[in-house]
Image: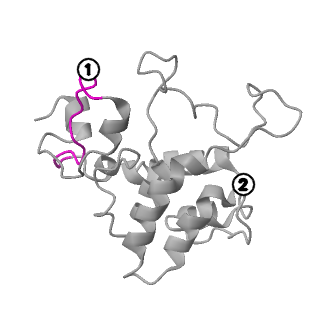
Amino acid sequence: MALALEISDEYWQRLLALIGNEGEDELLDRIIASRCPGRRIGIKLCHPKPYQRLLDTINAAPDQQPRLLADFVRHWYEELNRPPKPGLSEMTAMYDRPYWYTYGNKGLHDSGYFGRWCIEAVAVVKAFGLDDSVCLGHEHYPGDLLRPSGPSTHLLRDTETQPQAAQSKSPIAPAPRPGLWSRLLGKR
């Protein structure tokens, strides 16, 4: 998100100090190196599922990248469903599946639900200048973060009349409306 929001160098350096991890994950290191060219790049991928697809996208020929990016976004959420490590409670912080994975399954009233946005895809698009047009409108792709003044890339959802399954299969043609940041900041 820091890349998409173009945070200041002061905050960027502070964030890197908090993240640490230099040289431990090829994908993370390459994304960070897009703004810090001297970053040491790791040789392994800490979480191959689902992130191997995203690393393959970066490594692909430019004409293949949009399709591979869309493939990553399509599989991202389902591939995060990795079981907890043996012997640990599902509530333990030592897990492979994110703690928020099931939030929102019963609706927005679920405690702590904040959406299922694949920020990693946005970071790669920003860092490497990829074409994300085939991802626009996908429920997990927050492409609006890269278009703060543009129209939203997502359809409005009528959650009272459409069942969840029908919503996720809706067409991707975006309806023109103010962008996410314009709506949040009250700018029209």
Q: Are marks 2 and 1 in contact (CB under 8 Å)?
A: no
- Disc 2 marks a residue whose amino acid type is Asn
Q: Is mark 2 on a helix, strand or loop?
A: loop
* Residue drawn at point x = 63 percent, y = 38 percent: 98
Q: Is residue 12 above or below residue 88?
A: below
Image quadrant assignment for residue 84: top right
Q: How packed is label 1: few (under 14 Cα within 10 Å), some, or many (20 or more)?
A: few
* Residue drawn at point x = 69 percent, y = 45 percent: 82
Q: Is residue 175 above or below residue 134?
A: above
Q: Does the magenta stretch include residue 153?
A: yes
Answer with mark 2 or mark 1, whichever residue precedes in sequence: 2
Q: Residue 160 carries which label?
A: 1
- Disc 1 marks a residue whose amino acid type is Glu
* Residue drawn at point x = 67 percent, y = 40 percent: 97
Residue 102 x, y percent position in the rendering: 56, 30
Q: Which mark is residue 174?
A: none
Query: Residue tagged by mark 2?
Result: 21
Residue 151 x, y percent position in the rendering: 16, 47
What residue span does the magenta drawing correspond to? 149-162
Q: How packed is label 2: few (under 14 Cα within 10 Å), some, or many (20 or more)?
A: few
Is residue 128 among what the camera can see? no
Work out whether residue 160 or residue 54 is closer to the camera in this orientation and state it: 160
